Amino acid sequence: MSSILTQYPTVGGAQFRPEEIPFGFIWGVQFHLPEPAKSDGHVIQFIYQHQKGTNSNGQSINFDVKYWEAWKILKGSTTPTESMTVATAIGKQNMPVNSVNDYKFHRPMNDFFYKQFNTGNKGFYYIHGIAAFYEGSLPNDFIRNNAQTGAKQLLSTNKMPPFWQPGGLQRAVSYEFDFTNGKNDTKFKAKTIGAELAGTINSLYAFGQQIHKMF
């Protein structure tokens, strides 16, 4: 199975813009291709997550997760075939809006950066995504509800596709939090490196440099 990188997606005004919610944050986006796909393919996004800190019992938490997830785009289209809403993917609980009928809850999105912690937790959480459109097919290890990833119903794998390249639309969230002893101290930052710079992120070194610049 193989694919070829042909475009970098953008995210437009229909997104659920980055915002804090009680004990966490949410950021929803719709992917769009600048040009219609010449062949069937997928927006493939590399996800890196890091968390360090303690839970409500004072136990240490320190982990890193890396995986690749995919959204299918058909020939001639500019948007993925799969979408979801906050109402169906996450629900109303703890969301900072007055009604589940709020447009953001029922606006179709392709991807969410979403995290909520329990009271008593303290630490740092970071998530970074790199997305690009690849025409062609996926390796067979891309599966739905993959227990090795956090992609849920999306096709995903924890093995780097042989054709994957570091360049792409980048989004990242940095979230520092302290919910111990009744505290509600947070530092929330969200950044985007748009498609116009995607082609400059063509090595792991450049990727690391851009992460440093983002925060």
Image (tube, rainbow, N blue to C red):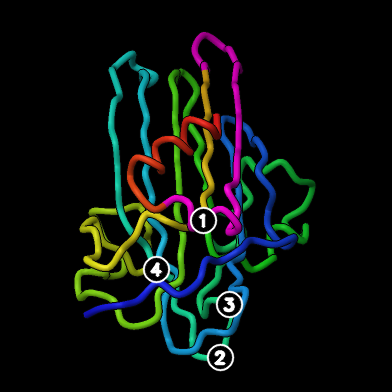
In primary-sequence order, the first of circles 2 and 4 is 4
Q: Residue at x 40, y 43 (%)?
A: 207
Query: Which region shows up in magenta?
Result: 178-201
Q: Secondary structure at mark 1?
A: helix
x, y (%) of residue 168?
47, 58
Q: Secondary structure at mark 2?
A: loop
* 23 with respect to 166 (left or right): right
x, y (%) of residue 129?
45, 50
Give the residue number, with chain letter if any, for mark 2. Answer: 76
Mark 1, mark 3: which one is toward the viewer?
1
> Rounded to the nearest whole Å, what is the CA distance between mark 1 and mark 3?
19 Å
In the rendered structure, which amino acid carries the disc numbered 4?
Answer: Ala
In primary-sequence order, the first of circles 4 and 3 is 4
In the rendered structure, which amino acid carries the disc numbered 2?
Answer: Gly
Q: Quadrant of the C terminus?
A: top right
Look at the numbered discs 1 and 4 and tell me whether their residues touch, using CB distance below 8 Å.
no
Most foreground residue, 152 or 47: 47
Q: Residue at x 30, y 53 (%)?
A: 67
Q: Residues within 10 Å of mark 3 (few under 14, many from 20)?
A: many
Residue 79, disc: 3
In the rendered structure, which amino acid carries the disc numbered 1?
Answer: Ala
* 153 with respect to 99 (left or right): left
In primary-sequence order, the first of circles 2 and 1 is 2
Residue 70, disc: 4
Give the residue number, with chain letter if any, for mark 1. Answer: 198
